[in-house]
Image (tube, rainbow, N blue to C red):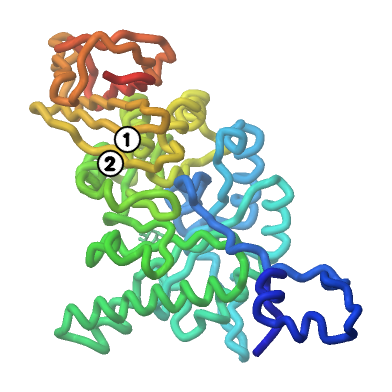
Amino acid sequence: MRCSAVLAVAILALCPLAAFSQTASAPKVPQKPVQRSAPPQVVAQTPPMGWNSWNFFHRNVTDQDVRHAADQLVSTGMKDAGYIYVNIDDTWEGDRDANGVLHANSKFPDMKALADYVHSKGLKLGIYSSPGPQTCARFAGSLDHEVQDAQLYASWGFDYLKYDLCTFREAVMTAQAPNDKAAQMRLMIAAYDKMNKALKSTGRPIVYSFCQYGWDAVWEWGPSVGANLWRTTGDIQPNWQSIYSILNENAGLAKYAGPGHWNDPDMLEVGNGQSSGPNSPIRYLTSAENRTHFSMWAMLAAPLLAGNDLPNMTPEVRAILTNRDVIAIDQDRLGHEATRAYSDGELDVWTRHLSGGATAIAVINAGSDRYSGHPFHLNLAKLGLHGPLKAKDLWTGKDITLTDNMPIELASHDILLVRIPSPK
Ligand code: GLA
């Protein structure tokens, strides 16, 4: 029997002869302190918060952009509000050398130095790969190099991996099991588990983020192969249609989320926008859309990974991203995701149970400006509640009283988000 037992108790119980074999008068406790292995470190007990390069920089991200993002997280107060992970998405990868070791490309001249820099700010660093031969942007993936890559990330000091299915579909799933969906799914699960085991074998606590767009109901099997979070849908875009349709696709998934394992409706587009053509101006999300997007990601207990240009964000966008009351909903320690209570025409009402018996209610106007002048009446009874209820409006910061059948005026795409400390 190996007697390098972890606990002194175990040594005493299982290896009495070895523990006391020297002499009859040997001390009853080992003279050298027993080496106890550290307990497994838990990650993502609340939804991870940070920043990711993809939504703003796409393929163009560089080492400098990542350093600037880290600087900004600190100087804008975002770090203090909980944004800790600085995540490099696709396009950092270079070539493998003769030993199969992957090197970063010229945009990232020294990953270890970058990790040290980010860590020196009290932040953590994330990286990106694919189980396929190539990533979605056609850079080197981890296929057949999973252990080697996991070791590389750990040696550089990474704390988070986003693992994106991409080319694994054609190169492995359809190639090996062309007409067998069940076999394809088994191949995919095995690939995610392979990297899970490779990450665990590094001994470094690394958040494991699945990105396979919600295929094959990943929320049902992801946690069993190590997922701390899993994308539930296709890619988000910086426009209302995309944000609202992702929100609706997440209705019904609440029961799968909880501490250590979260539904991921994709990274935030708060502060972003897009142009409809080469000569069109950028159409940014409106203030109302930014507020609603951020509020509802918090209600969904979603990872809050800002995806905007931090050095150039407006004070308004910064205020939205650092609203502590809304962040507290997201980070509530119970981890109970919101559910959609009811819809009434273009109005949706969601509720979320919070620790200490509190409740959050979100009312969204997904439609036109009609409700600006013609109020919607919130039916508290449909939420199992009765007015009057003392609440806080989390966007004005003011105390309000909710009454039965209360009239609410909401502009297009805007939200009322309230926290009720003692619902009845
Ligand atoms: C996929 C993912 C995105 C991003 C890109 C990078 O589309 O869903 O979030 O990571 O790949 O190529």
Q: Residue at x 61, y 31 (%)?
A: 77
- What x and y, as percent, mark residue 301? 37, 42
- What x and y, as percent, mark residue 242? 25, 44
Which quadrant of the structure image shows residue 248?
top left
Q: Residue at x 12, y 30 (%)?
A: 343
Q: Viewer-proximal residue, 97 or 294?
A: 294
Q: Which residue is mark 1?
A: 296
Q: Residue at x 25, y 76 (%)?
A: 185
Q: Is residue 283 visible?
A: no
Going by the numbered disc 1, the residue's amino acid type is Met
Q: Viewer-proximal residue, 84 or 41?
A: 41
Q: Are marks 2 and 1 in contact (CB under 8 Å)?
A: yes
Within-10-Å neighbours for mark 1: few <14, some 14–19, many 20+: many
Q: Quadrant of ligand 1?
A: bottom left
| Numbered tag placed on residue 305 in the rendering | none
Q: Viewer-proximal residue, 114 or 299?
A: 299
For marks 2 and 1, the one nearer the N-term is 2
Q: Is residue 4 visible?
A: yes
Element at label 1: helix
Which quadrant of the structure image shows residue 29?
bottom right
On the rendered image, what quadrant is the N terminus found in?
A: bottom right
From the viewer's perspective, is 381 left or right of 202? Answer: left
Q: Which residue is mark 2?
A: 243
On the rendered image, what quadrant is the C terminus found in?
A: top left
Within-10-Å neighbours for mark 2: few <14, some 14–19, many 20+: many
Vertical relation: 273 (above or below) 26 = above
In the displayed orientation, state which residue is furthest to the left.
345
Going by the numbered disc 2, the residue's amino acid type is Ile
Element at label 2: helix
- What x and y, as percent, mark residue 249? 21, 48
CA distance for labels 2 and 1: 10 Å
Vertical relation: 137 (above or below) 72 = below
